[in-house]
Amino acid sequence: MDVPCFVISKMRTSFIASFLANLVLAIVSLVMLPDRVAIHFGQGGMPDGWASNLAGTLIMLGVHTLLFCSLYLSPRLLASVPAKWISLPNRDYWLRPEHRTQAVEKFSQQMWRFGTVLFLFMLFVGLLTLKANLSRPVRLDEGPLIVALVIFLVYTAYWTFTLLRAFRIPPDN
C-alpha cells in the first residue's frame, strides 16, 4: 500500500518540528536555569550529576542533533550503500534495483515516525528536567517519567512490529 505524498510530508514535518521543539527547549532552559544544573537523577528523583548550564545545554543540543541527523540521513544510506552492508528484513527482495526506491520511501516513513515519538519523549523528559531544576530542592518527579517511559517502550515495540511488517515480501511475489 502506497502512502499519499501529503501524509509523507506531514510525517517529515512532524519529525522536524519535534526536533526543533527540543532545540527551543534547550535554549529556553539555558536562559531560565541557574549556572549549575542537575543533569542526572538517581533513585527518588534526587540529583546525582551536575554540570554548568552551558555544558548541559551543549550536551543536549549535540545529542538531539546527532539523533536527528542519524534518523534523517539513514534512509539515504539505504539508497547508496551496497546491499551486503545493510541489515533489513527480506533485504534480497527490497534491495533489488527495482524495489530499492520503494524500500527507501518505506524506511524514511518509519524513521520519521520513530523520530517524532523519540523527540516527543525527549521533549517531555526535558520539560520534567527543567521543572526539577527550577524547584527547591531540586528533585525530578519520577511518576510522569516512568509513565512516559513505559508508553515510549510500548510504542517502540509496536514500531518494531510495523517495521518488520512493512518489509514483508508482498504476497503477489
Image (spheres, rainbow, N blue to C red):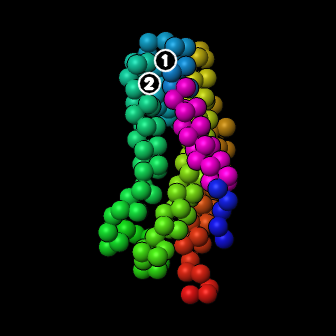
Relative to residue 159, is residue 9 depicted above or below? above
Query: Can residue 139 be spotted in the picture?
Result: no
**Quarter of the image containing the C terminus?**
bottom right
Q: Depth check: give the residue in front, 100 or 87.
A: 100
Q: Depth check: give the residue in front, 103 or 122.
A: 103
Whether residues under marks 1 and 2 lie with C-beta atoms below 8 angstroms apart, the answer is: yes
Q: Amino acid at mark 2?
A: Thr
Task: Measure the C-alpha gap from mark 1 to mark 2.
Answer: 6 Å
Residue at position x 58%, y 47% in the image? 12
Q: Amino acid at mark 1?
A: Leu
Q: Main secondary structure of the magenta part?
A: helix
Query: Can residue 31 be spotted in the picture?
Result: yes
In the rendered image, which residue does mark 1 sit on? Answer: 30
Labels in figure, total: 2
Residue at position x 51%, y 29% in the image? 23
User: x, y (%) of residue 154?
Assistant: 63, 56
Relative to residue 62, is residue 173 depicted above or below? below
User: x, y (%) of residue 38?
Assistant: 47, 24
Neighbourhood count class around disc 2 (C-alpha, 10 Å): few under 14, some 14–19, many 20 upward: many
In the rendered image, which residue does mark 2 sit on? Answer: 57
